[in-house]
Amino acid sequence: MLRWLRGFALPAAACQEAQPPTRYETLFQQLDRNRDGVVDIRELQEGLKSLGIPLGQDAEEKIFTTGDINKDGKLDFEEFMKYLKDHEKKMKLAFKSLDKNNDGKIEASEIVQSLQTLGLTISEKQAELILQSIDADGTMTVDWNEWRDYFLFNPATDIEEIIRFWKHSTGIDIGDSLTIPDEFTEDEKISGQWWRQLLAGGVAGAVSRTSTAPLDRLKVMMQVHGSKSDKMNLVGGFRQMVKEGGVRSLWRGNGTNVIKIAPETAVKFWAYEQYKKLLTEEGQKIGTFERFISGSMAGATAQTFIYPMEVLKTRLAVGKTGQYSGIFDCAKKIMKHEGLGAFYKGYIPNLLGIIPYAGIDLAVYELLKSHWLDNFAKDTVNPGVMVLLGCGALSSTCGQLASYPLALVRTRMQAQAMLEGSPQLNMVGLFRRIISKEGVRGLYRGITPNFMKVLPAVGISYVVYENMKQTLGVAQK
């Protein structure tokens, strides 16, 4: 990222203490574009961009606000020099924390060991990619000069922030969201980056869900009516829905699907933080097992909170034209005719489905991400949003295969009160009825449209997420 520094402003052979004024002055002159002896935020952003090292709005603002001691909105040379000296001290501490054998060089094995203490497991090949991105002389080791030059304008203050791109997920909801929430550093929480990133992911999820809503409604219709109608297949199902309610009916129930994204995400992330604190001691880093348990429990907590909206979504999707005038009318009629308990029909199979879904989802996700980094990554250890979305989509698909029968039973329990002549069965009774009348294949009715929506959901989420990040000024991880 900072190759230009090594050959021009920061010669690799130069000692930090030998000529600090010349080195700092050279950097300052590169950023002081109008030559007035001070650097404002715009000059900092444009200067870093022209040097090929744009960091993102949040990172650049952090550098500026940290360095601007007198708060006059400008950095003079003294402030600039003090910021660099203070930052180099922090980077020296981070370097020493990685240099386990104190030989003045960081090796791949030391990176693997250090990340393991932070609850992150990577292969030695992946650690070598980290070294390659920093290593200037091709020795496959990183000395202090290389480390300092690479992170000179990175506003990270410790090793945890430096490796934060090794998070689990992108925070994007593609319709069947990852159970394990994203994690944010304390700095991201203080700066407000966390909510902007969540907002970008939430908007991307809402647009994605709306775009794939016809397939989602078809899935629900096939789950509920598939066994009673020969026409309720992929093509016949669409025809039947359009004939019954017109093209607009394909989006019936999607309003509830979109509305629940915000409260579900908020509760999931809040609960995840609380469960992490319960499962780890003060100052202890969370491991993979603790993250899985915390994520599963957070998912269950969020589902408990928003589950009535899941019932409303199913009832609206299955309902006929004119049966409900909207979300509130649907809720009012359910309460009037069935009582409060109806809003939690199917809750038990839904809760049971979280464990196999979360376990397989997390395991496959980490396996796919590691495989990509081992075999396809070049000069980077950050997979990027599109790769993470692809890994998330495939791992989510595997998780759904394991938990889909429970999801189907949940949907039928939510809707069976609407079906004339249908007995009100519990979870075990429904399983027995489906297997006896439809066979094992009956447990997977509707899975085809469910899988069909994955690719468009990922593509739409990616485009919207990237645009929202730019709009909201979210820095790259």
Image (tube, helix red, strand yellow):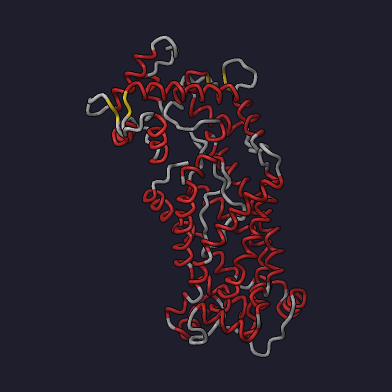
Observer-nearest residue: 276 or 447?
A: 276
The residue positioned 59% from the left and 66% from the top of the image is 306
Observer-nearest residue: 352 or 453?
A: 352
Q: Position of residue 316 (x, y in %)?
A: 54, 78
Q: Is residue 388 above or below residue 108?
A: below
Whether residue 376 is visible, yes or no, is: no
Q: Quadrant of residue 263?
A: bottom right
Whether residue 118 is visible, yes or no, is: yes
Q: Position of residue 308 (x, y in %)?
A: 61, 72
The residue positioned 56% from the left and 42% from the top of the image is 372
Q: Is residue 99 above or below residue 372?
A: above
Q: Is residue 10 above or below residue 370?
A: above
Q: Is residue 387 left or right of residue 341?
A: left
Q: Position of residue 39 (x, y in %)?
A: 29, 29
Q: Residue furthest bottom?
A: 421
The residue positioned 77% from the left and 74% from the top of the image is 428
Q: Is residue 351 left or right of residue 315?
A: right
Observer-nearest residue: 136 or 292?
A: 292
